[in-house]
Image (cartoon, rainbow, N blue to C red):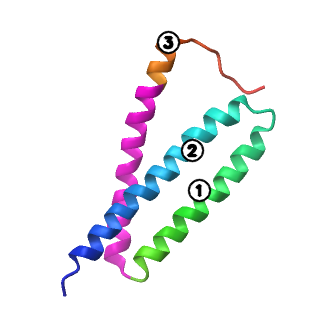
Amino acid sequence: MNEAPGLALALITGLLLGGVFFGGLWVTVNRGMESSQPALWFFVSLVLRTTLTVGGFFLVCGDDWARWLVCLIGFTLARFVVKYWTEARDEEAANGERKERHAP
C-alpha cells in the first residue's frame, strides 16, 4: 500500500533521464554544428537518447500508471533545469568569446 518509495524512485529517475536526454541534445547541437558530418551526430544522438530514455522509463515504471506520471513529471522538470543551466553557460561563452555558429 505504501507507494512513496516507488514514486520517489520514479521522480528521481525521470529527473536523471531528462537531464541526460536534454543535456545530450544540447551537446549534440553544439558538437553537430561544428562537425563535418552533422547528420551523423544528430541521428546517433537521437537513437541513443531515445533508447536510453524509453528503456529507463519501462525499467522503472513497468505497468504502474502512477509511476509513469511521476517519472514524466521529473523528465519535464529536468528540461527546465537543463534549459536554465545551458542558457547560463551559453551566456558566459558569449560574453567571453563571440563566435558565429551556423551550419556549413
Q: Is there a contact, CB below 8 Å, between mark 1 and mark 3?
A: no
Q: Where does the magenta region start and end? A: 64-89
Under mark 1, the amino acid is Arg
Residue 1 drawn above or below residue 23: below
Identify the secondary structure beneath mark 1.
Answer: helix
Q: Is residue 59 left or right of residue 76?
A: right
Q: Is there a contact, CB below 8 Å, between mark 2 and mark 1?
A: yes
**Residue 25: image tag:** 2
Give the mark nearer the N terminus: 2 vs 3.
2
Q: Locate residue 76, reporting x and y percent.
A: 38, 53
Give the mark nearer the N terminus: 1 vs 3.
1
Identify the secondary structure beneath mark 3.
Answer: helix
Q: Residue at x 50, y 44 (%)?
A: 23
Which quarter of the figure has residue 83? top left
Q: Which residue occupies the extreme right position in the image?
A: 36
The residue where tag 3 is placed is 96
Residue 15 inside the magenta-drawn segment: no
Q: Which residue occupies the extreme left position in the image?
A: 2
Q: Locate residue 3, reporting x and y percent.
A: 23, 80
The residue where tag 1 is placed is 49
- Measured Cα–Cα span from mark 2 to mark 1: 8 Å
Q: Nearer the viewer, mark 2 or mark 3?
A: 3
Which quarter of the figure has residue 47? bottom right
Q: Locate residue 93, reporting x and y percent.
A: 50, 19
Q: Is residue 2 left or right of residue 82?
A: left
Quarter occupied by the N terminus: bottom left
Quarter occupied by the C terminus: top right
Q: Nearer the viewer, mark 1 or mark 3?
A: 3
